[in-house]
Amino acid sequence: MSDQFYSDARLYDRLFPGGEQAVDFYRTETDRQGGSVLELGSGTGQKLIPIASDGHPCIGLELSPDMLAEAQRKADERGVEVQWVQGDMREFDLGRTFDLVFITANSLLHLHNAEDLVDCFRSVRKHLAPGARLIFDVFNPSVRMLAQADGVRRRRDALSFVDPDRGVVQVDVAETYDAAAQVTRGRWYFSTDSEADFSVAPLEIRNIFPQELPLLLSLGGLRVVERFGDWSRAPLTADATLQLYVCAPD
């Protein structure tokens, strides 16, 4: 399970602070689609708060209460109105439909079983208004990287960040790959020069390969309208690191 990984929402934001290209993409798509927006796995509101600040009515559904609390704090700080709802993206009923639903930043990959993914897509389908779209992004699995997931703890220099209270935080990760489940099982270690492993958290992420997604979407009552391999809308190729899908009701 990965609940512990998201129990410190501010630490999460410092670990993953960027995403400007993703934010720009989703803001552009929301402006193009218009209307109301639902984000599943909305986290601390990194994508949804900027979209709400553009004047779109927004709801964010998130399982983690810690992430929801930080999202509310950030929205209040910016004077932006967003409705935050605690819920599970596999099965939810908000009693209304939306013009755009999106799932960003690999949030979909916390659903490890095919049944859970299909349940999520079916729930999304029930919440899509006529002409609405589902948009989501997940990484494109690299067989080379999966083969290197040997359980050895290694430093991830690119992930180091500055914490205002602790100073420079270094990040180590140890991962193994469960090929039968298509799940990468990792343990993340956060340390400073004066405090080794002040936080250690497991993170388990599903790998979804490009040939799987159209079938899973179809089982959930959705079809692929477009798919891309990066935020500039380039085609999805074998060496693309991103899978970006635009979907509609089937």
Image (cartoon, rainbow, N blue to C red):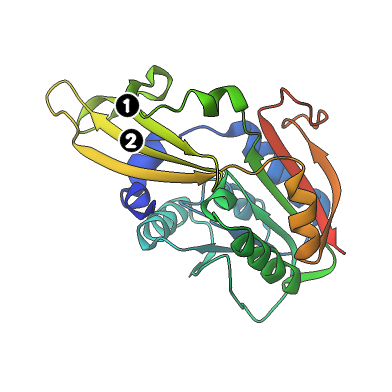
Amino acid type assigned to the residue bearing label 2 in the image: Trp
Residue at 60% from the left image edge and 52% from the top image edge: 53
In the displayed structure, 248 sits above or below 154; it is below
Task: Give the crowd class for mark 2: few <14, some 14-19, many >=20 residues within 10 Å.
Answer: many
Residue at 55% from the left image edge and 45% from the top image edge: 180
Number of numbered discs on residues? 2
Horizontal side of residue 137 vs 10, given as left or right: right
Residue 219 is situated, as x and y percent measured from the top left of the image, at 77, 64
Check disc 1 and report the residue beneath it. 172
Q: Secondary structure at mark 2?
A: strand
Residue 212 is situated, as x and y percent measured from the top left of the image, at 73, 47
Amino acid type assigned to the residue bearing label 1 in the image: Asp
| In the image, farthest residue toward the left | 194
Q: Quadrant of residue 230?
A: top right
Horizontal side of residue 33 vs 184, given as left or right: right
Instruction: Please say whether residue 155 is visible from this viewpoint.
Output: yes
Nearer to us in this view, 24 or 106: 106
Q: What's the distance in space between the residues labelled 1 and 2, CA to CA? A: 6 Å
| In the image, farthest residue toward the front | 180
Instruction: Please say whether residue 57 is visible from this viewpoint.
Output: no
Q: Quadrant of residue 223?
A: bottom right
Nearer to us in this view, 229 or 98: 229
Q: Confirm or deny contact between disc 1 and disc 2 (CB under 8 A).
A: yes
Nearer to us in this view, 89 or 219: 219
Check disc 2 and report the residue beneath it. 188
